Amino acid sequence: FPFIDFGFIDCADATEIRADAGKSGIFYIALAKCGLWKMIYNNDSDDFTVKKLTAEGEIVYRVGLGLGSEHGDYYKDPKAIYCNGVIEGEYGFFRSLDDGVTFERVNNDKQMFGEINSIDGDCREFGLFYIATGSNGVKYGRPVKG
């Protein structure tokens, strides 16, 4: 493991932690230049498993979770991961439907929105996500059908 300072997380830093609703002890942590991590606490053995979901050098400032499939159950099924940062050298907003194995960009170069305070997926509608900006209000997006 590379050294990760989880004490770096506070309100002055571009970091975000999301608990996986419906699943005990699972957390997704955006650690800016240290990337995106998944932490699982096992209550039976009282230990943690930590896995890095992004490649070395990738940056993730914000993370949120949403409905993971068209007819999925938000509380029981795997979730979509939404994040904001630099993936494969490109800044933007991204979604992963396979727990961070792959990411797809969900915005274009004209949709940047300035300072981003948070990102989250919808728990009822697959593909719908929200971005809380610093000065442009709350934006939302969904896949184009076609």
Image (spheres, rainbow, N blue to C red):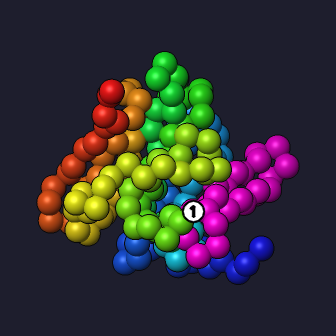
Q: Is residue 72 left or right of residue 98?
A: left
- The residue where tag 1 is placed is 36
Q: Quadrant of the C terminus?
A: top left
Q: Position of residue 44 (x, y in %)?
A: 82, 43
Residue drawn at (41%, 29%), measured in percent from left and top?
126
Q: Is residue 37 left or right of residue 17?
A: right
Q: Is residue 55 above or below residue 63?
A: below
| In the image, residue 96 lies in the stretch drawn in magenta | no
Magenta segment: 36-58
What residue occupies the far top of the structure in this picture?
A: 71
Q: Quadrant of the N terminus?
A: bottom right
Q: Is residue 132 above or below residue 25?
A: below
- In depth, the one of 34 and 41 nearer the eye is 34
Look at label 1 and name its amino acid: Leu
Q: Is residue 33 left or right of residue 64?
A: right
- In depth, the one of 125 and 103 nearer the eye is 103
Mark 1 burial class by Cα count in 10 Å: few <14, some 14-19, many 20+: many
What residue occupies the far front of the structure in this picture?
A: 146
Residue drawn at (25%, 44%), measured in percent from left and top?
140
| In the image, residue 50 lies in the stretch drawn in magenta | yes
Image quadrant assignment for residue 109: bottom left
Q: Is residue 78 visible?
A: yes
Q: Is residue 9 left or right of residue 6?
A: left
Image quadrant assignment for residue 35: bottom right
What residue occupies the far right of the structure in this picture?
A: 45
Q: Is residue 31 visible?
A: no
Residue drawn at (30%, 46%), measured in percent from left and top?
130
Residue drawn at (44%, 74%), measured in percent from left and top?
10
